[in-house]
Image (cartoon, grey):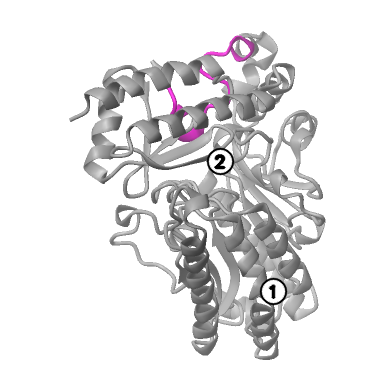
Amino acid sequence: MLDLYSQISSVPIGYNHPALMKLVQQPQNASTFINRPALGILPPENFVEKLQESLLSVAPKGMSQLITMACGSCSNENAFKTIFMWYRNKERGRTGFSKEELETCMVNQAPGCPDYSILSFMGAFHGRTMGCLATTHSKAIHKIDIPSFDWPIAPFPRLKYPLEEFVKENQQEEARCLEEVEDLIVKYRKKKRTVAGIIVEPIQSEGGDNHASDDFFRKLRDISRKVEDLIVKYRKKKRTVAGIIVEPIQSEGGDNHASDDFFRKLRDISRKHGCAFLVDEVQTGGGCTGKFWAHEHWGLDDPADVMTFSKKMMTGGFFHREELRPNAPYRIFNTWLGDPCKNLLLAEVINVIKREDLLKNATHAGKALLTGLLDLQARYPQFISRVRGRGTFCSFDAPDEPTRNKLISIARSKGVVLGGCGDKSIRFRPTLVFRDHHAHLFLNIFSDILADFK
């Protein structure tokens, strides 16, 4: 079986890696795997040391603080809470809580529960807990029957490929989406609802592996002064943007990409106006794009404020700057707060990544895969379009959902596991030990499938 989906992009270095098999068989590690502590009240004596060997050894630039969680949803959910707490503390100008705040929060009313929101994009997927689900818009089945928050939702660009052949059309599409973002901010201001953040995936995966061009984000900068004017007006009305959340590549919604320049300009705006900048690396983190964290491709002068992770990292959680540290105990808390045995495994995974130079491999193998997909697109344009990717984080569109599903099913019968996303996309999420010869093996199998497809 050639697994190019890896348990929804959550297997870092393949199945039963010898280094991990050896680790779990060592007697001194037995207690860590058997006993799971409530980390918030009674962590193991060596917990900080183990974090330094694992998560803190790959901490993104500028983020010294770490909170571990169990999954991507709870990581994003608690990151939202951290930003809201940080911003509310800035508003009140003190660390204490008033009697009115303490009383009104118990009945879900302001000022104890301020009316903040996170702006998200159609096609996005950020999790299935209540706050995250309000920012998830990739499939109706995720949301049907569940009450939600009235938070703003903007369209995400649907680019045409090849990009070089549709420059004007894609510029117009991105301009349309940017205009909608502005209109939504104004609309929610009139509704007296505070936009506390913006969430976007650079590549929408589940929604169809939809990409956006680099120029889209440059256009965002072109209108940024209008956006900045709106932010200033918000502040005067005390309806302030408190944070921005963005994924380096929109994953579940369709693998949608955006340019590095867009993210740099977005960071500039967040810094200028005192907004927290949150990067969601739940699916893009861990090396699959050729860098350990996908946002490292951006070349930020000023690091992000918060970054969430999960999947390939074996555990969930988020890094953040010290100034966003909660101002009281138990504000960010649950029973487990992660799992020490996952940190033990992750430390060895990181050693393997470094020892086997797997980040470089992801770039090299990704190029082989993407080149091969482009060749198949040229040969079978009736079945493959919009080929796109970064590292091994690749995808393409089928003509429709039934065709997509049939291709995935046939591939499975031939021993290849692929993933679907969006309306009609197929995505590739191989592990970091995926090599050039694996790419060529898949391409040969898939070429035969397409040649015989009816």
Q: What amino acid type is highlighted by mark number 1?
A: Arg
Q: Give the range drawn in magenta.
A: 3-21
Provide the residue designation for mark 2: 70
Provide the residue designation for mark 1: 88
The reply to whether residue 262 is in sight is yes
The reply to whether residue 256 is in sight is no
Q: Which of 230 and 78 is in front in this view?
A: 230
Q: Does the magenta stretch include residue 18?
A: yes
Provide the secondary structure element on which disc 1 rests.
helix
Q: Are marks 2 and 1 in contact (CB under 8 Å)?
A: no
Q: Dot 1, crowdedness within 10 Å: few (<14), some or many (≥20)?
A: some
Q: Marks 2/1: CA distance?
A: 26 Å
Left or right, residue 405 beside residue 39: left
Residue 367 occupies quadrant = top right
Q: Is residue 391 above or below residue 167?
A: above
Residue 444 occupies quadrant = top left
